[in-house]
Image (cartoon, grey):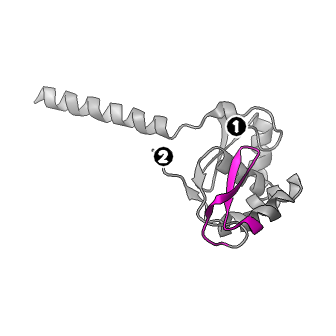
Amino acid sequence: MKTFVASAFAFIVAFSAVSVYAEKIDIAKVKCLISGAAAKEDKAADWKDGKVYFCCGNCQKKFTDDSKAFAAKANHQLIASGQVSQGACPFSGGELNKDASIEFKGAKIGFCCNNCKGKAEKMSDDDKVEKLFGDAAYEKAKFAKADKK
């Protein structure tokens, strides 16, 4: 009986370690959404279906004090870090076309057609942040917590 309990405990510990590892973000690739500096794993805040990361406590506090002001950048970080996956076009809400996508600062965004893709490609970087990652686009694109494999 003791052997069974010990084996069961070892299995649970091993499974938990694998589950935690699968949820890890490659923090080396993440930039603070406020300063653009390298983010630190211990400077994070919950945001929608994931966590957003910062370089320091000051940036973290700026975000937690007024997260809506940084919503588009926070959404971008969730997408770029692979914490969420896209379900629809951010402009039309239509089904994604695998041949119509762009990459913007580490985040791949898909579209329903080449017209929507072309519209995004012509935007300034500031417009891309707001129109591709703002809350309205995020909702229309049906972003949801990504399945970890």
Element at label 1: loop
Amino acid type at circle 1 is Val
Front residue of 124 and 67: 124
Residue displayed at 58% across by 55% down? 85
Front residue of 9 and 139: 139
Q: Quadrant of residue 132?
A: bottom right
Q: Position of residue 144 (x, y in %)?
A: 57, 59
Element at label 2: loop
Q: Residues within 10 Å of mark 2 (few under 14, many from 20)?
A: few
Q: Quadrant of residue 124?
A: bottom right
Quadrant of the image for the C terminus?
top left
Note whether 105 is above or below 136 in the view shown: above
* Highlighted range, magenta: 93-115
Note whether 71 is above or below 14 in the view shown: below
Q: Position of residue 136 (x, y in %)?
A: 73, 68
- Residue 148 numbered mark, or none: 2
The answer to whether 23 appears left or right of 27 in the picture is: left
Amino acid type at circle 2 is Lys
Magenta stretch encompasses residue 111: yes
The answer to whether 17 appears left or right of 29 in the picture is: left
Which residue was labeled with disc 1?
30
Q: Position of residue 139 (x, y in %)?
A: 66, 67
Total number of numbered discs in the rendering:
2
Magenta stretch encompasses residue 90: no
Residue displayed at 62% across by 66% down? 88
Mark positioned earlier in the residue sequence (1 or 2): 1
The answer to whether 69 appears left or right of 22 in the picture is: right
Q: Residues within 10 Å of mark 1 (few under 14, many from 20)?
A: many
Quadrant of the image for the N terminus?
top left
Q: Quadrant of residue 87?
A: bottom right
Note whether 17 is above or below 137 in the view shown: above
In this view, the residue farthest toward the left is 1
